[in-house]
Image (cartoon, rainbow, N blue to C red):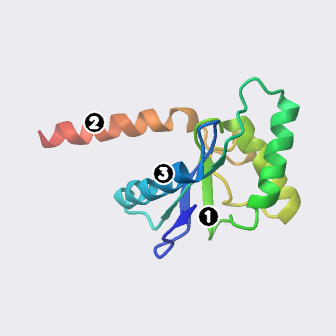
Amino acid sequence: VQYNSALGPYKGGLRFHPSVNLSILKFLGFEQILKNSLTTLPMGGGKGGSDFDPKGKSDNEVMRFCQSFMTELQRHVGADTDVPAGDIGVGAREIGYLYGQYKRLRNEFTGVLTGKNVKWGGSFIRPEATGYGAVYFLEEMCKDN
């Protein structure tokens, strides 16, 4: 689901969980517009996913699903179009499989996914980034009060 790219590419997460359906993705995509607008960065809102549950699946099963998923998704994502990140059920392993398939299909790999492993150009502090963001927010709130 992609909402409003007037300011820049769509940005949101990919979710693999049995509860995923179109209504949930529409809601989360709309919510992502609001979250992204607070950053003041030029991004629209989007959300994607599947009711596939990676829990209890082998690495091979997850890899094959991610490759199939990206084979369809690759037409709709890119550095200037839509830059997904991981969400529930989509961690570094899944992002790595998605990234590898995108790279194979498009022979392009810059700026297509966030949350990649460091060896593929990801951030060193990705696992801690959300926590740091919460601390920075709290510090700013305390300064004003």
Q: Are marks 2 and 1 in contact (CB under 8 Å)?
A: no
Q: Secondary structure at mark 3?
A: helix
Ranked by sequence position, the earlier of labels 1 and 3 is 3
- The residue carrying pointer 2 sits among few (fewer than 14), some (14 to 19) or many (20 or more) residues within 10 Å by Cα, namely few
Q: Amino acid at mark 1?
A: Asp
Question: Eyeballing the image, is 89 above or below 50?
Answer: above
- Rounded to the nearest whole Å, what is the CA distance between mark 1 and mark 3? 15 Å
Point out the tag, 2 or 3, that comes first from the N-terminus. 3
Q: Where 74 sits versus 89, above or below?
A: below
Q: Which residue is mark 2?
A: 138
Q: Position of residue 54 (x, y in %)?
A: 73, 32
The label number, if any, that marks residue 92 in the structure image: none
Q: Secondary structure at mark 2?
A: helix
Q: Residues within 10 Å of mark 3 (few under 14, many from 20)?
A: some
Residue ID at (85%, 34%): 61
Count of marks placed on residues: 3
Task: Return the residue found at the far left.
Answer: 145
Query: Residue at coordinates 83% horizontally, 39% vertically from top-left?
Result: 63
Q: Which mark is residue 28?
A: 3
Query: Can you give x and y, in whole percent of width and height, for residue 129 in the image?
Result: 49, 38
Which quadrant of the view contains residue 34? bottom left
Q: Amino acid at mark 2?
A: Leu
**What is the crowding at mark 1: few (fewer than 14 residues within 10 Å), some, or many (at least 20)?**
many
Q: Position of residue 14 (x, y in %)?
A: 62, 48
Residue 49 picture location, percent across and down = 64, 48
Q: Which residue is mark 1?
A: 82
Quadrant of image for the N terminus: bottom right
Q: Tag 1, which secondary structure?
A: strand
Asked where in the image residue 70 lies, by quadrant, the reply is: bottom right
Q: Are marks 1 and 3 in contact (CB under 8 Å)?
A: no
- Of badges 2 and 3, nearer the viewer stands 3
Q: What residue is shown at x 43% (from left), y 33% (from top)?
A: 131
